[in-house]
Amino acid sequence: MAVRKSDGKIIGMINVRYNLKEEMYKYLGHIGYCIRISERKKGYASEMLRLALIEAKKLGLNEVLLTCDSDNIGSSATLKKNGAVLENEVPYQGKITQRYWIYL
C-alpha cells in the first residue's frame, strides 16, 4: 500500500505479508516498509507501522517478524518505538540483518 500526501506525492509504502515462505521468515518478515528520503524523520514510518500492526492483528497474526539492516538506525528505532524486541542477527546478502518480533 502506498501512503500519499494530499498533493498525491508518495510518502512511503508498506506491505503486510501473512504467509511467509522460508526465506521471508528468516530474513524479511511479516511487514516491510520504505519512506521517501525527503519524508524521513517526520514520524511517518512509526505511524504506518502502527496501522499495519492493526491490520496484521485483523489478519489473525498474534506476533509479527520485522527485519532491518543492522546499520539502519532509523528503522531500528521505528521498530522499537512500536514495541519490537530484537531476537537475533543473521548474515543476509552481504549484510547483517536484525530480526525483531512484535507481539500483538
Image: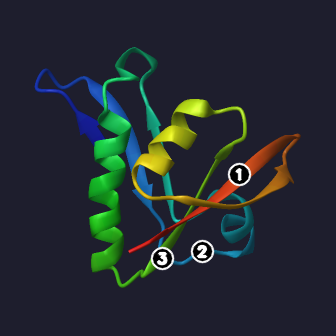
Residue for point 27% across, 67% down: 54
Camera-near label (2 vs 3) is: 3
Q: Is residue 52 left or right of residue 79?
A: left
Query: Would residue 96 be visible to someone looking at this image?
Result: yes
Residue 70's image quarter?
Answer: top right
Type of the residue with mark 1: Gln
Q: Is residue 64 above or below residue 95?
A: below
Type of the residue with mark 2: Leu
Work out which quarter of the rendered image holds the C terminus and state it: bottom left
Tell me the element at label 3.
strand
Residue for point 63% across, 33% down: 72
Q: Is residue 92 above or below residue 65?
A: above
Task: Name, please, the residue furthest toward the top.
Answer: 38
Tell me the element at label 2.
loop
- Nearer-the-camera pick, 81 or 75: 81
Query: Would residue 1 be visible to someone looking at this image?
Result: no
Type of the residue with mark 3: Glu
- Nearer-the-camera pick, 11 or 50: 50
Camera-near label (2 vs 1) is: 1
Which of the marked residues, 2 or 1, is nearer the chain's N terminus?
2
Return the residue at label 1. 98
Give the CA separation, mark 2 to mark 3: 13 Å
Return the residue at label 2. 20
Residue for point 33% across, 59% down: 52
